[in-house]
Amino acid sequence: METENLMLYKLMILYILRKVDFSLTNAQISAFILDKGYTSYFNIQRSISDLIEEEFISMDIVRNSTLYEITELGSETLSLFSNLISSGIKDDIDNYLSENKYELRNEASIMANFYQVKKDKYSVNLKVTENNSSLMEIILEIPTEDEATKLCNNWKSKSTEIYSYLLSVLLEE
């Protein structure tokens, strides 16, 4: 029975990832499944780990977030076994994604990361994407890790304002 349940959790994760056209974080995937009470956090993490190992999903680590996308192999597998997910679960997923798509996309489309280039020099990469296409990317060199962290932390709340400002200034006659 446990193997069947794990297969269902894996299929649910694949279904969620195929229904969106952007990457999702571990927290976003886990939140839905945990909120609905389908399984435990441990089972979700085990399922995600198995899906990565089986190459059904890919992952990308950006700062302190891991982003997941379904692979072609994962999509093919889901097509073969999606009938094992009940229509009730599919409806729950579809409704959740429909109600939260903007927030989910916004969380995943605004990225900030930094790394140390050399002593007293950090490279900060600030990015806004839409439909897997880059709208804006800013790379700054900052002298301290604290400043790099602050830039990354403020990027989510200020990126829209900065994008609008840059467009208005650069499009002036």
Image: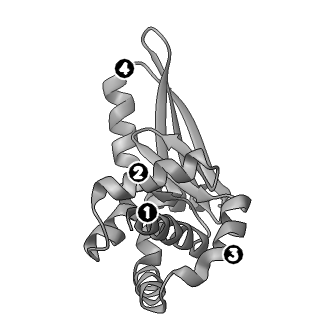
Q: Could you tell me the amino acid type at mark 3?
A: Leu
- Image position, residue 62 (x, y; %): 49, 41
* Tag 2–tag 1 contact (CB < 8 Å): yes
- Image position, residue 66 (x, y; %): 46, 46
Q: Earlier in the sequence, mark 1 or mark 4?
A: 1
Q: Quadrant of the N terminus?
A: bottom left
The residue indicated by pointer 3 is: 80
Q: Nearer the viewer, mark 1 or mark 4?
A: 1
Residue 165 in view of the camera? no
Q: Nearer the viewer, mark 2 or mark 1?
A: 1
- Category of crowding for the residue at label 3, using alpha-carbon neighbours closer than 10 angstroms: few (below 14), some (14–19), many (at least 20): few
- Image position, residue 68 (x, y; %): 54, 54
The residue indicated by pointer 2 is: 46
The residue indicated by pointer 4 is: 144
Q: Could you tell me the amino acid type at mark 4?
A: Thr
Q: Quadrant of the C terminus?
A: bottom right
Q: Earlier in the sequence, mark 3 or mark 4?
A: 3
Report the side of 27 relative to 68 (left or right). Answer: left
Along the viewing direction, whichever of 72 and 3 lies nearer the viewer: 3
- Category of crowding for the residue at label 4, using alpha-carbon neighbours closer than 10 angstroms: few (below 14), some (14–19), many (at least 20): some
The residue indicated by pointer 1 is: 6
Q: Could you tell me the amino acid type at mark 2?
A: Arg
- Category of crowding for the residue at label 2, using alpha-carbon neighbours closer than 10 angstroms: few (below 14), some (14–19), many (at least 20): some
Q: Residue at horizontal 34%, vertical 44%?
A: 153
Q: Earlier in the sequence, mark 3 or mark 1?
A: 1
User: Gap between marks 3 and 1, in whole Å?
Assistant: 17 Å
Q: Residue at horizontal 38%, vertical 58%?
A: 44
Q: Residue at horizontal 47%, vertical 76%?
A: 101
* Tag 2–tag 4 contact (CB < 8 Å): no
